[in-house]
Image: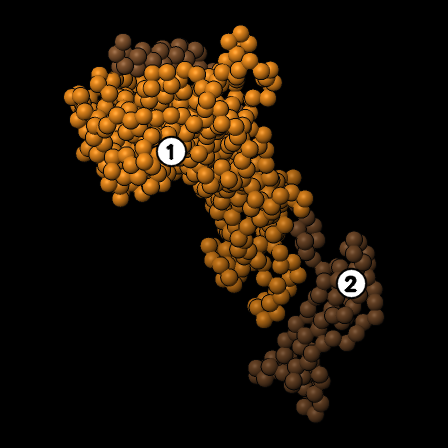
């Protein structure tokens, strides 16, 4: 028997084994990614904030609460009770016009208040701003 | 001396220096006489040999030797033979004698016939046992190649032999053993031809041709790699609001205009709370505040509540996560082979996934760089990892390239030569056969030697794998493809300009609770107090479309050309 026939038979036997092996089912599954749950969009949302009381507006009514006490340092109402009626010791808190009010004979000059600082019962500052009487006087005929 | 040079004068494993190899011609040799020298467990058993000795070496795996020993009439302890070291030397008579080590291994499966008292021995080089006993780092060093735990499985607790095979699957080399029994790599391709078998040097009529079947000659690999990860996303929406009483003016001018006809105003806290209540958060505010005390104004103005606003610009933001899949659709092809035999396709697929359980940390992080103090910093969330993807892609590309190279070298040519004339032929060498009408080049992939003690024939069967490539073929470098781009569907048009409605005047319309922006009342009104508007601030956030949040895919298609080396196959 020729050597090449032996070799050929061996090779064909090897091929047969390979073919048989390929005929077996392949148990290798291609890898897959697990399906993710759909998350959905984020809907449009309304952001809302309501506060009917505006700070400093006294509930929207405004105005000056009696009594008025002179002096910027007069006591403020207690926190949480803005309606408490405040009293206190008045302190001088006023500025004067430099000229003032002349007496009719012109001998005396009475001091004239330019600005008077008061504090109302809510603790808010109230200003009295008065005119210069000397200027009015000079304009008089 | 064999063919003019001493045996073993050149290291057998020096294949990597193939560029400097000089082709040696193997011419028809003279007759020779030989004898085998076999040591089993350190004892010379040459005198007990019966029949023939066979040694088979395949490029992928062990060398296997089989022989038979007559153990004589004395009692033997047969169980002791398994595991004993076995060496086989081939000795060519002459002056001096040439002694060539053909096999170094261990007896693995002896069988004993008590009647004939013949011990049949199967010995192997125990390659897988050797690899299994190695440390991972040592395997990496010895085997080389590429590896990624996304392409293969994590290595812990798994067979080191399988691990070595996985690394081997990424390179055009084979893992086998040398004649001393040591593991080594031999290449599939070398440029230089180590030996040429000249006319008359091979055994007459021994040439055998084993051609690959067409369905095995894969010429296209369709590779799919999917990479899923989480995108950490954020939407910023700009808003602006300006009180209409300012007549569009800012600064003192706008304030004076508003003061002439004053109304309620929103404040910083309301605007912030409105954004919060939508589940978004506010940043980059530009507040147009109501002025504080202006004693020199005419009339003078006193105000403590400077958080009240005449206008505002701000950004509202929301965060969400989106799972996305980068789909790489890669085709590796051998154009010349496709043109010749049409498409023969093999498919491969690998996936990379990331954990999404921490995604909510981002959703809830709300503008802070980190989430809750006990949580992982947001910066450490599993972001897209290019390094991981690169490792997997380059590994997968290499596997597919090797599949193609292997499929194109399945043509095997076998011939036989007298063993003594070809003692230095080894796996991985490139040979040229120029005898018996064949002109073939190829790389040695199998060696079978048969030393027949009875007949005195010692023959080596040499099988070479012939690579079927196109000499002019172009191979593209296996560069990592660039990432596909994810595109968002366009969002619905959205305006961040907030309107205003002011009530409590006779001419004021009824309160509109749908209208966003600011609603309030005039400070001095003449309308019905029952119809007073609430003082409120409202924003509507834009919708984030489903497509921005649901899992999304983007595909990248790439084609690489592969060019196997070109061998000769003329018969």
Residue A76: assigned label: 2
* Residue B549 in the figure: left or right of residue B18: right
* Residue B291 in the figure: left or right of residue B433: right
Q: Residue at x 49, y 24 (%)?
A: B45
Q: Chain of mark 1?
A: B
* Residue B347 in the figure: left or right of residue B277: left
Chain letter for the part of the structure drawn in orange? B
Q: Pick whichever, B108 or A138, lies toward us.
A: B108
Task: Identify the image quadrant of residue B301.
Answer: bottom right
Q: Secondary structure at mark 2?
A: loop
* Residue B72 in the figure: left or right of residue B557: right
| Residue B220: percent from left, percent from top | 30, 24
Instruction: Give the mark toward the camera: 2 or 1.
Output: 1
Q: Pick whichever, B187 or B237, lies toward us.
A: B187
Q: Residue at x 57, y 32 (%)?
A: B156
Task: Identify the image quadrant of residue A17.
Answer: top left
Is residue B80 among the parts visible in the rendering? yes
Q: Pick whichever, A20 or A29, lies toward us.
A: A20
Task: Identify the image quadrant of residue B512.
Answer: top right
Q: Secondary structure at mark 1?
A: strand
A110 shown above or below B535: below
Name the residue carrying label 1: B99
Q: Residue at x 60, y 81 (%)?
A: A135
In the rendered image, the quadrant that contains the N terminus of chain B is: top left
């Amino acid at each position: 028997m020729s050597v090449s026939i032996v070799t050929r038979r061996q090779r064909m036997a090897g091929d047969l084994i390979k073919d048989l092996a390929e005929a077996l089912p392949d148990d290798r599954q291609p890898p897959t990614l697990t399906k993710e749950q759909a998350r959905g969009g984020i809907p449009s949302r309304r952001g809302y904030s309501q506060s009917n009381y505006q700070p400093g507006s006294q509930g929207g009514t405004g105005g000056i609460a009696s009594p008025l006490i002179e002096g910027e340092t007069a006591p403020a109402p207690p926190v949480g009770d803005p309606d408490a009626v405040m009293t206190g010791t008045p302190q001088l808190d006023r500025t004067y016009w430099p000229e003032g009010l002349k007496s009719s004979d012109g001998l005396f000059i009475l001091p004239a208040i330019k600005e008077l600082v008061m504090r109302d019962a809510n603790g808010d500052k109230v200003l009295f701003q008065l005119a210069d009487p000397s200027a009015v006087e000079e304009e008089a005929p | 001396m064999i063919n003019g040079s001493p045996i073993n004068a050149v290291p057998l494993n020096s294949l990597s220096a193939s560029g400097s190899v000089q082709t040696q011609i193997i011419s028809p040799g003279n007759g020779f006489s030989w004898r085998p020298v076999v040591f089993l467990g350190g004892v010379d058993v040459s005198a007990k040999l019966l029949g023939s000795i066979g040694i088979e070496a395949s490029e992928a795996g062990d060398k296997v030797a089989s022989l038979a020993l007559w153990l004589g009439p004395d009692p033997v302890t047969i169980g002791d033979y398994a595991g004993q070291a076995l060496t086989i030397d081939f000795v060519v008579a002459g002056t001096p004698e040439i002694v060539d080590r053909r096999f170094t291994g261990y007896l693995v499966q002896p069988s004993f016939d008590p009647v004939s008292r013949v011990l049949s021995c199967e010995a192997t080089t125990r390659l897988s046992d050797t690899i299994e006993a190695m440390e991972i780092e040592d395997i990496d060093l010895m085997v080389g190649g590429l590896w990624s735990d996304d392409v293969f499985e994590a290595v812990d607790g798994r067979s080191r032999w399988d691990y070595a095979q996985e690394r081997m699957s990424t390179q055009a080399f084979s893992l086998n053993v040398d004649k001393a029994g040591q593991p080594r790599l031999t290449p599939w391709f070398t440029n230089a031809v180590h030996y040429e078998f000249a006319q008359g040097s091979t055994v007459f009529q021994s040439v055998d041709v084993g051609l690959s079947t067409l369905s095995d000659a894969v010429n296209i690999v369709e590779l799919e790699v999917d990479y899923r990860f989480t995108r950490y996303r954020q939407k910023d929406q700009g808003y602006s609001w300006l009180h209409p009483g300012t007549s569009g003016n800012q600064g003192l001018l706008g304030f004076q205009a508003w003061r002439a006809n004053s109304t309620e105003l929103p404040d910083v806290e309301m605007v912030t709370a409105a954004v919060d209540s939508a589940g978004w958060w506010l940043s980059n505010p530009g507040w147009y505040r109501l002025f504080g005390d202006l004693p020199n104004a005419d009339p003078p103005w006193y105000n403590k509540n400077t958080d009240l606003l005449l206008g505002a610009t701000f950004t509202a933001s929301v965060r969400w996560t989106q799972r996305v899949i980068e789909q790489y659709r890669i085709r590796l092809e051998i154009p010349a082979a496709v043109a010749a035999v049409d498409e023969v396709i093999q498919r491969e697929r690998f996936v990379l996934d990331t954990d999404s359980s921490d995604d909510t940390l981002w959703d809830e992080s709300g503008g802070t760089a980190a989430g809750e103090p006990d949580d992982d910093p947001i910066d450490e969330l599993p972001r897209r990892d290019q390094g991981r993807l690169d490792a997997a892609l380059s590994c997968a590309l290499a596997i597919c390239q090797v599949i193609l190279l292997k499929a194109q070298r399945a043509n095997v040519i076998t011939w036989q030569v007298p063993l003594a004339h070809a003692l230095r032929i080894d796996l991985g060498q490139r040979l040229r056969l120029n005898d018996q009408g064949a002109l073939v080049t190829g790389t040695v992939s199998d060696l079978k030697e048969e030393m027949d003690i009875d007949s005195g024939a010692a023959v080596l069967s040499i099988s070479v794998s012939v690579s079927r490539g196109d000499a002019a073929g172009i191979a593209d470098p296996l560069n990592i493809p660039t990432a596909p781009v994810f595109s968002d569907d366009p969002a619905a048009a959205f305006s961040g300009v907030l309107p205003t409605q002011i009530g409590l005047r006779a001419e004021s319309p009824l309160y509109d609770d749908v209208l966003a922006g600011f609603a309030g009342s005039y400070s001095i009104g003449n309308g019905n107090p029952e119809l007073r508007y609430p003082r409120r601030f409202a924003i509507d956030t834009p919708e984030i479309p489903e497509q921005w949040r649901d899992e999304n895919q983007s595909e990248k298609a790439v084609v690489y050309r592969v060019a196997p080396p070109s061998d000769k196959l003329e018969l």
